[in-house]
Amino acid sequence: MTLEELQAKLREMGIPHDEWNPAGGKSVQLPRLEKYKELLLQLRSLLESQVEKDKAQLADLHAMLQRTKHGGGA
């Protein structure tokens, strides 16, 4: 596969080959991966806070169920 064929294939797949920096023996920074990493960390934070809220709500509902089972009402 020639360089031109590879570049055409990358374009077809939606991968912008021209955004990559040549490594030159150094670590490569991929701009899209950095953005994805940032977004995934934000999503992780949101999901963790939602899990904590859900746990608290579940505990409240469990307590309410126990009171209802034992005639305590709401």
Image (cartoon, rainbow, N blue to C red):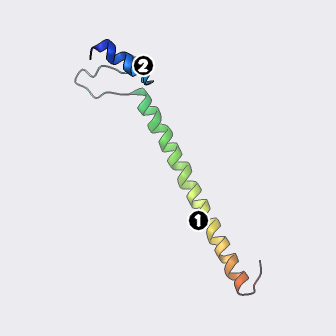
Quarter of the picture holding the C terminus: bottom right
- Dot 1 surroundings within 10 Å: few (below 14), some, or many (20 or more)? few
| Farthest left residue in view | 25
Instruction: Indicate left or right for 20 with 69 as reference.
Output: left
Amino acid carrying label 1: it is Lys
Instruction: Indicate left or right for 7 with 52 as reference.
Output: left
Q: On the image, numbered disc 1 is attached to which residue?
A: 55
- Dot 2 surroundings within 10 Å: few (below 14), some, or many (20 or more)? few
| Farthest top residue in view | 4
Quarter of the picture holding the N terminus: top left
Q: Residue at 38% x, 21% y: name it.
A: 10
Snapshot quadrant of residue 49? bottom right
Q: Residue at 36% x, 21% y: name it.
A: 20
Looking at the image, residue 46 lies above or below residue 28 = below
Snapshot quadrant of residue 18? top left
**In 3D space, how far apart are the residues under numbered discs 1 and 2 (Cα atoms)?**
45 Å
Tell me where residue 32 appears, x and y as whole percent.
Answer: 44, 29
State how many labels appear. Answer: 2
Tell me where residue 4 appears, x and y as whole percent.
Answer: 32, 12
Amino acid carrying label 2: it is Arg
Q: On the image, numbered disc 2 is attached to which residue?
A: 11
